[in-house]
Image: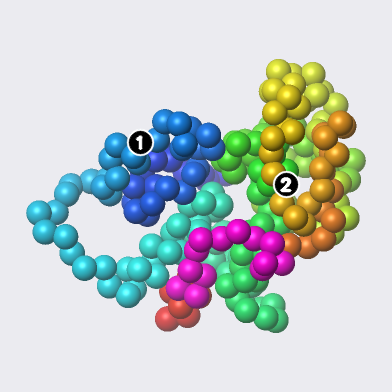
Amino acid sequence: MARYTEAKCRLCRRSGEKLFLKGDKCVTKCTYDKRPKPPGPQLSRRRRLSDRGAQLREKQKVRFSYGVLERQFRRFFAEAERQSGITGENLMILLEKRLDNVIYRLGFADSRCQARQLVQHGHFIVNGKRTDIPSFIVKEGDIIGWHETSKKNAYFKLVAESIGSKVVAPWLSLDKTPMVGRVTSLPKAGDIETKYDMASVVEYYSR
């Protein structure tokens, strides 16, 4: 399966802002704070960003944040466009319903990248069945828990100790004793804290 393998901090520098791709490390030890300039050769004179360039940057910020490659992101956009309502909001809701994002939102991982790795290694079950596909789309009423063998490793114990300080998304619920999450409702636009200009993303693909 294709995935991004370069340094995550390069994505933040390329986007021109922190995307918090490495969890707590982005707060305590961040390369962007030391080197905020974009990677690669530095131009002697700063060039003005065109409207098309601004739209591309906004699209890349969303894609980098959710860890989705271009082809898959285009499929999500096409599906969001087919649905009724506002395309930008539909796209964000689809991305939020990915299993790796749900694991992150429940507080089982410090970043979506870490959540994706945990899912791929088979640490979670959805409705009693082991699921190792990060792009799996959850539905209302789905129950997400840890696989029995995963409850014996050191990482599970570490999460169990720190889960009390985590904030769970409003469309999810978490029973902290058995460490089981539930999708109580489908996410709505108002439930998603976003700093992205989704209108620019829609405009980028609409040209």
Q: Is residue 195 visible?
A: yes
Q: Which mark is residue 168?
A: 2
Q: How many marks?
A: 2
Figure check: 118 above or below 51: above
Q: Quadrant of the C terminus?
A: bottom left
Q: In this view, which residue lies farthest toward the front?
A: 165
Q: Amino acid at mark 1?
A: Thr
Per the rendered image, the range of residues in magenta is 188-200
Q: Position of residue 194 (x, y in %)?
A: 56, 60
Q: Position of residue 45 (x, y in %)?
A: 11, 59
Q: Residue at x 49, y 44 (%)?
A: 20
Q: Amino acid at mark 2?
A: Val
Task: Identify the residue under disc 1.
Answer: 31
Front residue of 78 and 105: 105
* Residue 88 placement, left or right of 48: right
Q: Position of residue 163 (x, y in %)?
A: 73, 33
Disc with the residue nearer the chain's start (2 vs 1): 1
Q: How is the image coloured?
A: rainbow
Pointer 2: residues within 10 angstroms few (<14), some, or many (20+)? some
